[in-house]
């Protein structure tokens, strides 16, 4: 009887908590100000007396001012030198020596296209038509960015952690070509006709290795056979037969990547990486390696081909036969060989762990400045945004983070974040839940 009573109370407690969380979610969604990136409408900002990590040729400036006008950085000068350039009415932020960095890259994620992993109605990251292997229809025309929800509750959660942008990467559905993705800023913009995808970042995503054997008849070798077929269909001048892998729209989409377009290959094993390099060279593709757990084994080849790697610096266990040679100094070895690297945790709800990845890479031989670049300037360069984002220098978008300590230390936190020069409100659904229940606890 007591057990049944306890079970009933436990159930009621769960229902009550779930209802409270649901109510908070609704309240959050209904309040447009809280989900907007803007906390201060002023477009002119002077951040004075910061330790500025420019992630550029200027290196680190110990006591500098950063002036922002209309969403762009207009000056990075010694502290006090910006005074005569400051527009009337500009907001002045006293940094008092705190670190200032570019906005942090969240990695390759599903933020804004996946809200609750276990609730299918909130997951738009992939397509799966359940086609049998012998009757596959690949859909490279699938563009996951069209499902991006700028008002996702995950966006403010990431922003207050210093993350200002991500690359939306489609998940593999029922073929090795997952579809297209691209970079989006966490600015919360929601206007008619506004496209969230940042210009120049669009990419095609292809998954290879042992995990895709179910799509290729049981052999990873067949992946290239099928890729060659799809490319042949795309380049064919006449009609394509009814057994084609691609629809007309798919051929058009794939064709855009066969003349220097960016293709992200998710692959781990060293020999598979070499196969990707050879395949890309034959087909005039601009490859990016995602994963690359065994990349250190072929670091010279990657550097020679000028192919960047987006990796998880904490991957050090042989979790499957594609990762037998994983090691914690993978990032350091790749960087020493001259490979452009960036970090991605593979997480959506905990994408902010990317700073931990960078810090751990430093602990295993990667220079500190290189680790910061791997979550700021490098991913911007890899995904075609280097001219506009990723560094603190004149003309760049004012995506900035003011920290209370070392940005690569997990104990440090962001004091203020700016996206395109607009200060964001440092609140999220999580902080609101925290504050709500802390107040309730104090009352009782």
Image (spheres, rainbow, N blue to C red):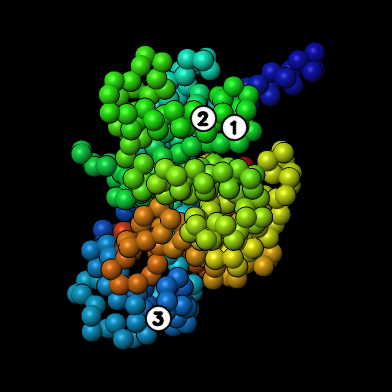
Q: Nearer the viewer, residue 159 or 339?
A: 339
Residue 56 on image: x %, y %: 42, 73
In this rendering, the answer to whether 14 lies above or below 79 is above
Q: Measuring 39% from the left and 20% from the top, which residue is drawn there?
A: 244
Q: Counting other residues with Cα less than 10 Å from the Cα at mark 1, is it few (<14), some (14-19), or many (20 or more)?
A: some
Write the residue at 70% across / 50% down: 326
Label 3 or label 2, whichever comes before in sequence order: 3
Relative to residue 1, is residue 234 depicted above or below? below
In the rendered view, does 310 fall on the left or right side of 52? Answer: right
From the top left corner, tell me how far across and down residue 303 is, in percent: 54, 61
Disc number for residue 221:
1
Is label 1 or label 3 in front?
1
Report which quarter residue 223 is drawn in.
Answer: top right
Which numbered tag is attached to residue 64?
Answer: 3
Residue 342 visible in the snapshot: no
Q: Which residue is mark 2?
A: 225
């Amino acid at each position: 009887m007591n057990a049944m009573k306890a079970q009933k109370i436990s159930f009621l407690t769960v229902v009550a908590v779930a209802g409270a969380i649901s109510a908070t979610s609704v309240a959050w969604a209904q309040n447009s100000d809280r989900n907007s990136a803007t906390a201060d409408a002023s477009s002119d900002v002077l951040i004075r007396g910061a330790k500025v990590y420019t992630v550029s040729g200027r290196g680190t400036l110990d006591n500098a001012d950063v002036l922002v006008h209309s969403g762009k950085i207009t000056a990075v000068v010694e502290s006090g030198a910006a005074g005569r350039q400051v527009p009337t009415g500009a907001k002045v932020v006293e940094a008092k020596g705190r670190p200032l960095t570019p906005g942090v890259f969240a990695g390759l994620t599903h933020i804004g296209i996946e809200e609750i992993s276990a609730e299918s109605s909130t997951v738009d990251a992939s397509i799966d038509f359940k086609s049998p292997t012998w009757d596959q229809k690949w859909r490279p025309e699938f563009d996951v960015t069209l499902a991006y929800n700028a008002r996702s509750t995950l966006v403010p959660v990431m922003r207050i952690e210093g993350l200002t942008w991500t690359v939306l990467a489609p998940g593999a559905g029922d073929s090795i070509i997952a579809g297209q993705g691209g970079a989006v800023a966490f600015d919360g913009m929601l206007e008619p006709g506004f496209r969230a995808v940042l210009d120049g970042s669009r990419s095609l995503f292809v998954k290879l290795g042992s995990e895709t054997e179910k799509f290729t008849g049981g052999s990873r070798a067949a992946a290239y056979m099928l890729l060659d077929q799809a490319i042949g269909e795309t380049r064919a001048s006449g009609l394509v037969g009814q057994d084609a892998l691609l629809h007309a729209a798919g051929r058009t989409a794939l064709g855009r990547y066969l003349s220097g377009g960016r293709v992200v290959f998710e692959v781990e094993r060293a020999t598979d990486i070499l196969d990707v390099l050879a395949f890309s060279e034959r087909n005039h593709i601009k490859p990016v390696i995602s994963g690359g757990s065994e990349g250190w084994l072929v670091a010279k080849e990657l550097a020679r081909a000028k192919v960047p790697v987006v990796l998880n610096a904490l991957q050090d266990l042989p979790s499957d036969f594609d990762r037998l040679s994983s090691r914690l100094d993978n990032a350091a070895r790749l960087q020493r060989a001259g490979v452009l690297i960036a970090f991605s945790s593979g997480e959506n709800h905990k994408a902010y762990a990317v700073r931990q990845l960078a810090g751990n890479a430093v602990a295993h031989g990667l220079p500190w400045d290189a680790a910061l670049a791997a979550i700021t300037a490098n991913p911007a360069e890899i995904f075609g945004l280097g001219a506009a984002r990723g560094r603190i220098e004149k003309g760049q978008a004012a995506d900035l983070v003011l920290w209370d300590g070392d940005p690569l230390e997990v104990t440090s936190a962001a004091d203020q974040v700016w996206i395109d020069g607009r200060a964001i409100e440092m609140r999220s659904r999580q902080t609101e839940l925290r504050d709500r229940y802390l107040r309730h606890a104090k009352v009782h």
